[in-house]
Image: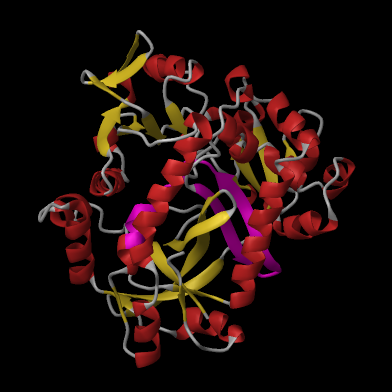
Amino acid sequence: MSTSIVDTAPESAERLNRECFCITLDRAALCAALNEEAGDPGFCAHLIGTRPHLFSTAPVFLAVATMAAMQRTVGAIEAVTSLAGYRDAALAWAPEIARRSFGPRGVFMGYDFHLAADGLRLIEVNTNAGGAYLNAALAKAQRACCAEVETALRHAGADDFDAGVIRMFLAEWRLQRGTGAPSRVAIVDDRPEEQYLYPEFVLAQRCFIQHGIDAVIADASALRYEAGRLTVAGRSVDLVYNRLVDFQLDLPAHAALRAAYLDQAVVLTPSPRAHALFADKRNLTLLSDPALLGSWGASPPMLAGLEALPKTVRVTAGNAEELWVRRKALFFKPASGYGSKAVYRGDKLTKKVWAEILNHEYVAQALAAPSERAVEVDGARQLLKADVRLHVYDGQILQVAARLYRGQATNFRTPGGGFAPVFVA
């Protein structure tokens, strides 16, 4: 887990986020690290230079107790999703493809937290959470102005990231295939070179190759499936690292991948089933209902871990009037949403947008305001919002990172904002 531990009192985390400016991003070191990771001396200038707000200059501090609480919440969700009652409910609103289970659990699960004024809040779970490879490089490029933090940086564990990632993908392979390893991996998205996080695909490809697994970056529409064999450019693909946001593979451009997946001709991770069990926003209505979970056999420790989830309900014609009245205390999310698209703070809603929400499948979540981090931008100190993302596999935390931003949802358009490393204080 690439998180540093700074030997200071736990209660200092909030003060450090308000007042500490001594750790900054060394952009020259970052570029060197990225170029080395990608095996391309022009990688940083070409791909990162065009994304000026991808990385923040400041880290985020967390208390040890906060990290422990996050781990308990992750463990509780992983345990609850194994309950028959939960699985039946979550899969009841999922399409048929999600009801097939071939073994894999799903790589790079993303658990997104806010440190709200009234305590830790898990605002959502995502199956193809981005940023892990980029944050691993970011952790290597930090510098400090004090010896204690410099020591912590040297022990951040970022060098273990690649090995942990390869173990994760091999575990996925063996859950479906039993033994061996894939010969070729395809990192798949729609128009991958146009994606904002495309630099991460390059780093992922390089990681596989360095560990003896051939890897390609492929547009999903370029995949072909014939005679029980998934190919790209005539070459067989054994495992697909899935970055698509068509979570159930419904689009015509994804027909080849869908057919190969259903025939088990390829190992696909994360899969439609993983999304249906973890990341459909309607599942938040289940996870935030302790009475319902208790009726399915959730234990007291599970329920305690899930106290971090804000109360969430589906938006229906029956509760629309009540939700409109209470909208300023709510956050609205589409059931199959991703990347903060089409999400709305209730206090920003117009009647026109509300009418659109009522015509689609949405949930209303109790508002959990994020914490703040002070940063320096052009010599001036500003407060940015912060959220914390855990990259998780099979309940184990692979990496902790933060995102700093201004606005109603995370973005990469804020000066001084972007991905930020996390230090546990």
Q: In which quarter of the image is residue 45?
A: bottom left
Q: How is the image coloured?
A: secondary structure
Pick the residue in front: 169 or 248: 169
Question: Does residue 413 appear anywhere in the picture?
Answer: no
The magenta stretch spans residue 60: no
Pick the residue in front: 237 or 174: 174
Pick the residue in front: 96 or 55: 96
Question: Does residue 283 appear anywhere in the picture?
Answer: yes
Locate residue 79 relative to residue 402 in the image: left or right: right
Name the residue at the top extreme.
Answer: 227
List x then y, in percent, for residue 12: 56, 86
Name the residue at the left extreme.
Answer: 41
Where is 371 relative to 234, above or below? Answer: below
Q: In which quarter of the image is residue 29?
A: bottom left
**Point 62% across, 18% down: residue:** 96
**Point 48% across, 15% down: residue:** 263
List x then y, in percent, for residue 397: 53, 58
Count the numbered circles shown: 0
**Point 19% across, 56% down: residue:** 49
Name the residue at the bottom extreme.
Answer: 147
List x then y, in percent, for residue 309: 70, 54
List x then y, in percent, for residue 199: 26, 47
The magenta stretch spans residue 115: yes
Locate residue 88 relative to residue 199 in the image: left or right: right
**Point 57% across, 35% down: residue:** 274
Where is 375 relative to 387, above or below? Answer: below
Q: Start and end of the magenta stretch?
A: 109-136
